[in-house]
Image: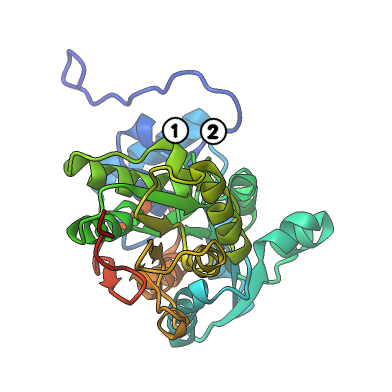
Amino acid sequence: MNASGQHTTARPGPRSGPVRLADVAAAAQVSPALASRVLNGDPAARAAPATKARIVEAAARLGYVPNVAAKSLRVSRTGLIGLVVHDLSSPIYLELMRGAREEAARHSYFLVLGDVDELLDDDDAFRIFISGRRVDGIIMQGGHSELDLRIGDIAQALPTVVVNAPTEVDHEGATQVFPDEPAATRLLTQHLIELGHRRIGLVSGPRQSMTNRLREEGIVSALDAAGLELREDDRVHGEWSADGGRAGVDELVRRWGPGTDRPSALIAGNSLIGIGMLGAVGRHGMVVPRDLSVAAVHDTWINEHLAPSLTAVSLPLHEVGTVAVKTLLAGTNGDRLTLSDPPPVLHRRASTGARPAG
């Protein structure tokens, strides 16, 4: 309100680049979601006529150009939704795929699978995929910096939902759906602390990966609550793979040297890393869990069939897949959704045991 009692709109500060929906929302003093619905003519948008008029006026005044991809699911339909993840052979994403497939089928859509790394390696395939109207929308695994940099371009061409981990910045129109990663590693760390472990190490993916950072955050917070710490010398960062797990254990053993103090437990950044770690520990003459406990993020069907079976925490990936498809079909608006219900679940198995004596 101004001094005369008239409603005024906020004027955003100067910015470079095209006007975003968030700029219109700020100018009209409403949420981006409401601004999107009003500008797209959504009859279900709940807003007073004066509010709708304010949004339209702000868009016209700022010169906002709507993202045509946001309407594509309503004006043209192939019946296909793309799901793009890193390494389609990984068992980690089976529940994510199952949740997405089941929800897509409920709406008479089919799921088309793609590999992030292949798309990033082939510029022609990437351009065709996002601009050739091969799919009506796309669900992409985030948390990897190279892909995260291109999500904005993808979201301008296709309705886009990012899953797995939040990106560094918000992208216009791309909704993000991810599980509570810190809660998962807090749960694992608390389990190891309850078993008597006081020095816990980590073998994980690239240090600057958002996924890795969130998982480290959970470990650090659980250790801090117990008066402990995650030492820098007890961390190794490499690939999200079994090879990365083997290399991580090899590096830690090299650092420890004969007769030196070392962690009594290690957390793997994911189950593939954990599988590689189990084999590597044996090669160095240690027995799991007698000499070293190993636990991992992301439970898979394989973990209980290993020798020893691998303790892991499962995240609600089935629900992530379901919500991602629901969000895509309802219309993306740039929100960030953290799924904390259902919470992560700990699966205690033979790879973790009481802290070794001595």
In the rendered image, residue 214, in percent from the top left (x then y), is placed at: 39, 47
Left or right: where does residue 154 sit relative to residue 314? right
Residue 25 picture quarter: top left
Residue linked to disc 2: 19
Q: Residue at x 17, y 44 (%)?
A: 226
Q: Residue furthest right?
A: 124
- Tell me if label 2 and label 1 are in contact, CB under 8 Å: yes
Indicate the quadrant containing the N terminus: top left, top right, bottom left or bottom right: top left
| 186 or 64: nearer the viewer | 186
Residue linked to disc 1: 23
Left or right: where does residue 355 sit relative to residue 251? left
In the rendered image, residue 216, in percent from the top left (x then y), is placed at: 38, 46
The amino acid beneath tag 1 is Asp
Q: Look at the image and name its color scheme.
A: rainbow
Q: Residue at x 43, y 52 (%)?
A: 333
| Within-10-Å neighbours for mark 1: few <14, some 14–19, many 20+ | many
User: For numbered disc 1, what is the local secondary structure?
Assistant: helix
Residue 315 picture quarter: bottom left
Left or right: where does residue 196 sit relative to residue 61? left
